[in-house]
Image (tube, grey):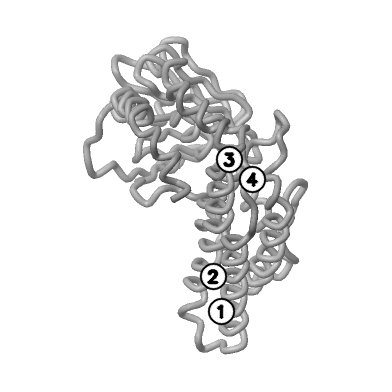
Amino acid sequence: MMAAGDGELLVEHPGAFVGKRSERVRVSLGRDTLHERPLHGLEQVVIAANGVTLSSDLVRACAEQGVAIAFLSRSGTAYARLMAPGLVGTVHTRREQLLAYGDARGVALAKAFAAGKLGNQANLLRYMVKNRRAEPELYEAVREAAFQIQEHARRIAELPGTRVEELREGLLVQEAHAAKWYWDAARRLVEVPDWQGRETRGATDLVNSCLNYGYGYLYHRVEQAVILAGLDPYAGFVHAEVCTEQSAGARKRYRMVGTPSASTSIPATSSLTILRRSRLASSPSPCSRKSARSRSWARRVSAERSAASWDWAVT
């Protein structure tokens, strides 16, 4: 598989070779060229198959142009990533992130992440059921679920406390109640006979397997954005502080996009190329873009200049 449009190249073809020729990236299998595209405009290369090999020339070119190379497991989880060391934001941003945990900024961010997730859940349910008025029982049940989820979001916004520790338990309780409403409604909307509900690790059914893969891929995209912004993906504001637990806060706001249909979340500005085994279909990007290195540098400068935005978050 290969997605290329908004600067992404996703390779899911076992045994493929990804190399560089002149200023272009080439994906080949034996003597056959499967895909070739310019390095210009490329933001990341994602390897999601076994037996894929990379040339050192490609790795160096990607590092010089600010293109990340990520490696995904079969479940969609990123287990390794290659990035140029200069593309990880500024230390000032990371310091402010750590300091924010202990004051009102941490409270505001924790509430914003959780309420944003629940708001997206409610909006998505309303969108998916809007054309099913001919099924009044389903329509009313899903609308009621969306309403209840919105109520839990309102309660999160009203939780008392000036530090994260003071509201963590209440926030997680509201999230759990909302999740039950959401997945019960999603199960009725999807209408897959053997799908009994949400299951995370170890799922074997089609819907949960697709959801888990999509979430794994989404986590990779969000984690990379967090790192490029100069933030620590493990220094969250609500969830466990252990080295294997990435912060769920930032990705929550985007997690609901496309999940009931078990599809991977991709920004709306992307165009997509799919390459699986010997099938190839492409949709080129409609506009030219700055190089990844230029954009990464601009983000670093912007992060340094906008440190005051941490204070703005609690107003």
x then y, percent, for residue 229: 44, 31
In the picture, the disc for residue 163 is 4
In this rendering, is residue 20 above or below 158? above
What's the distance in space between the residues labelled 4 and 3, CA to CA? 6 Å
Say if mark 1 contacts mark 3, CB within 8 Å.
no
The disc label shown at residue 143, or none: 1
Q: Residues within 10 Å of mark 3 (few under 14, many from 20)?
A: some
**Viewer-nearest of discs 4 and 1:** 4
State if disc 1 and disc 4 touch (CB < 8 Å).
Answer: no
- Please say if 293 is above or below 208: above
- Can you say whether 16 is above or below 273 in the image? above
The front one of 272 and 237 is: 237
Which sits earlier in the primary sequence, circle 1 or circle 3?
3
Left/right of residue 28 with respect to residue 209 in the rendered view:
left
Asked if labels 2 and 1 touch by Cβ distance under 8 angstroms, the answer is: yes
Residue 252 visible in rendering: yes
- Residue 99: quarter of image: top right
Which callout, 4 or 2, points at the residue further toward the start of the chain?
A: 2
Q: Which amino acid type corresponds to the residue marked 4 in the rendered image?
A: Arg
Looking at the rendered image, the disc whose residue lies closer to the viewer, 4 or 2, is 4
Q: Is residue 73 above or below residue 271?
A: above
Q: Which residue is mark 3?
A: 103
**SS assignment at label 2:** helix
Q: Mark 4 or mark 1: name the one nearer the start of the chain.
A: 1
Looking at the rendered structure, the kind of residue marked 3 is Asp
**Residue neighbourhood size for the residue with mark 4, other residues' Cα within 10 Å, grouped as few (<14), some (14–19), many (≥20):** some
**What residue is pinned by disc 2?**
125
Camera-nearest residue between 105 and 47: 105
Element type at mark 4: loop
Task: Give the mark, 4 or 3, whose residue is nearer the N terminus.
Answer: 3
On the image, the x and y values in percent for residue 104 come to: 56, 45
